[in-house]
Amino acid sequence: MTVTVGCDPEFVLYDKEQDKIVQTTKVFVPSYFSLSFSTQEDTMGCELRPGYSTKPREVVTNLRDIITLWRKTPEKHRLTDRYQLAVGAYCTTHPGQCIGGHIHVGSLPSCSINNKTYDRWTPHSRRLFLGASYLWILEDPNTMWKRRAWAEGYGGLWEHRGLPDGHGTAEIRHPSSDWLAHPRLMELALSLVQHLGDTEETPDEERIEDLSDCYRDLLKDHDVFPKWVRKVNALITDCVPSKILTEIKDFVPELHKRRRKDGTTILKEEEWHGRG
């Protein structure tokens, strides 16, 4: 595949001594910025930015290396053993603080981008954004809609943008960071969006319009979410191997077991080093 994938997801910090999620800005003062990771002043978390690749597994390795490096940085900004990284959509102990798992898809085919008005998406790109919403099945059903309280707001279906990098890159901004709870799950999620971005097969515009119309209804009636997932599945079934969709779905029970009462899931770093 020629389409590249990357991400700049947000993680939150679990304080083992206090047994709770804490704001990153209270741990790292002042905030820290580098090309690969930063602590943020405007949110409760931190942002990690692994390098792009045409191979999703390489992006997973890049993220693992960033975490490893952070554990070894100078003391002032080191991620010490007291803290663990956690993912999610919304932390109930920090109302109003959402957690994002933004995905970047670069070198998109020309059919995906309207070069005259870059923020107006073609049917191919709209299928990409709709298809990526399949990852919502990984989120905590009790908090996922808090992240999407407004139809056009943060975490909303169409809350995306093109990145001015000159490489035809779209940033998918609606997923939470739950897809980063496990290295294999991260690889699968990136593979999903890569297949969606790489295909030039003509999208089913009728299904796209139907899903677009259904979105506002979904925000009002969350019980129709299973129906939404089935419609998304039908839209992308010709673009994404069924094995990827099935394996992503198979992670749902495991995430349910791992998820804390506050809606977050703590990363098991040993899994990222092949020991889990």
Image (spheres, helix red, strand yellow):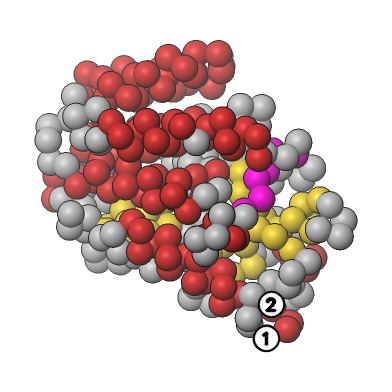
| Residue at x 31%, y 53% (from the top left corner) | 105
Q: Which residues are magenta?
A: 262-267
Q: Secondary structure at mark 2?
A: loop
Question: How far across and down, in percent of the image, does residue 135 sit?
Answer: 44, 36
Q: Which residue is mark 2?
A: 78
Q: Secondary structure at mark 1?
A: loop
Of all residues shown, which one is farthest toward the right?
18
| Residue at x 73%, y 72% (from the top left corner) | 80
> From the viewer's perspective, is residue 27 above or below residue 146?
below
CB within 8 Å, label 1 to label 2: yes
Give the side of residue 158 with respect to residue 266, left or right.
left
Question: How many numbered marks does the figure carry?
Answer: 2
**Image quarter in which the N terminus is found:** bottom left
| Residue at x 70%, y 60% (from the top left corner) | 84
Q: Which residue is mark 1?
A: 74
Residue 28 in view of the camera: yes
**Badge 1 amino acid:** Pro
